[in-house]
Image (spheres, helix red, strand yellow):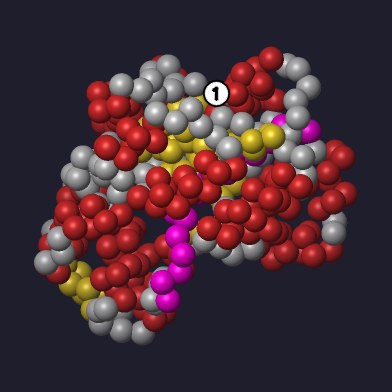
Amino acid sequence: MQKFDSFLYSSGFSKMARPFAPFLGHILMIHRVVEPDGKPRLPENQLYEITPAILKNTIRFFRDRKYVFKSLDAMVDGIQTGEKLEKFVCVTFDDGYTDTCTTAYNILKEEGIPFCIYITTDFPDRKAAFWWNMLEESLLVSDEMRFSLDGKEHRIPCAAFQQKRDAFRTICRLVLNSENGISAAWKAVFEPLGLDRTTWVERLAMSWEQINQLGRDPLVTIGAHTCSHPSLAGLTEEEALYEIRDSRAIIREKTGLKVEHFAYPYGSTLDVTDREARLAASLGFKTAVTTNRGNVYRYHRKRLMLLPRINVSPIRTMEELTLAADGCIPQTFFRF
């Protein structure tokens, strides 16, 4: 798919789709906005981190094309009216990393751009950590990972760089598919290493004080992103309902804010089914976003619980945004 995208972009063919692309706009997905520190990294995590320059270039890209930056509330109001709309773009951030409330916020505030942050409540509650970041740093300084999980002993070599990448993907699968749940799984992986979860989460995750501070800004929408960041499709219906419902309740309790927007963790078609969409709708959310790649169309007014997004990544950023703005790939292949 990447090679096909590159062909459409480099050949200029995607521009031909523009007059025939009836999409209304885009929802952008961002996780982190950080300056590179020069340390070795694994691409599996680095793909979800952009620099301040990329964020500024993304803003400029859409403004040059006369897009209107809208809040999620304004987007919903617009697509439900049936009126002709200016092309819009919504900016969203997942998880609640500290750099969202510092680096990203400062840029967007200066530009007057509204955005939504989806909060996983166990992070500011200091009950969980960004285990994928912990895993990366552990692999980069290890030659082998040893742990016991689901009754099995694992010894995974990770001396060479490619082995570290392979180990990252293998351990992620083991954690996400663990019969005892994600929280118990990552504890089993990291406890033998003596890693301090509290230090990690305090370094990377926003506090409730920071979330409250952001929530007072009219430009900022606070959304829910579950309590513990599980793959909801792998849970029982009761467990999935708890994660969706209680994350909203906790945010309300901690901030006093009305929480009307939701993001599914991981968010692919493997992680989100019609069941999860039904649960989100039953709880009264206005929107729920996936990580499925695509643009927003008029028909999404009937599928507000399964909205697609465009990932803003450090690789092929302008290529991806151009294809989205031309309506080429998302229109043709990813109509959710």
- For the N terminus, the quadrant is bottom right
**Residue 228 magenta-drawn?**
no
Which residue: 59% across, 43% down?
111
Q: Position of residue 210 (x, y in %)?
A: 32, 40
Disc 1, SS: helix
Q: Amino acid at mark 1?
A: Asp
What residue is drawn where x is 88% and y is 49%? 16
Residue 31 lies in the magenta stretch: yes
Position of 15 relative to 74 (above/below): below
Residue 201 shows in the view:
yes
Is residue 196 rendered to the left or right of residue 268?
left
Residue 115 located left or right of residue 229? right
Looking at the image, residue 287 lies above or below residue 264: above
- Quadrant of the image occupied by residue 145: bottom left
Q: How many marks?
A: 1
Toward the viewer: 135 or 117? 117
Residue 153 visible in the displayed image: no
Start-end of magenta stretch:
22-38
Residue found at x 11% / y 66%? 194
**Residue 11 location, quadrant:** bottom right
301 or 146: nearer the viewer: 301
What is the x, y in percent for residue 108? 54, 44
Give the class, few, some or many, for how many residues have Cα within 10 Å of label 1's Cα (few <14, many ≥20): some
Q: Residue furthest front?
A: 110
Instruction: Give above or below for 65 relative to 256.
Output: below
Quarter that holds the C terminus: top right
Q: Which residue is mark 1?
A: 73
Q: Answer with left or right where residue 64 lies relative to residue 145.
A: right
Say which of 71 and 330 sits in front: 71
Residue 245 image position (x, y, % from top left): 31, 24
- State the residue at coordinates (36%, 44%): 96
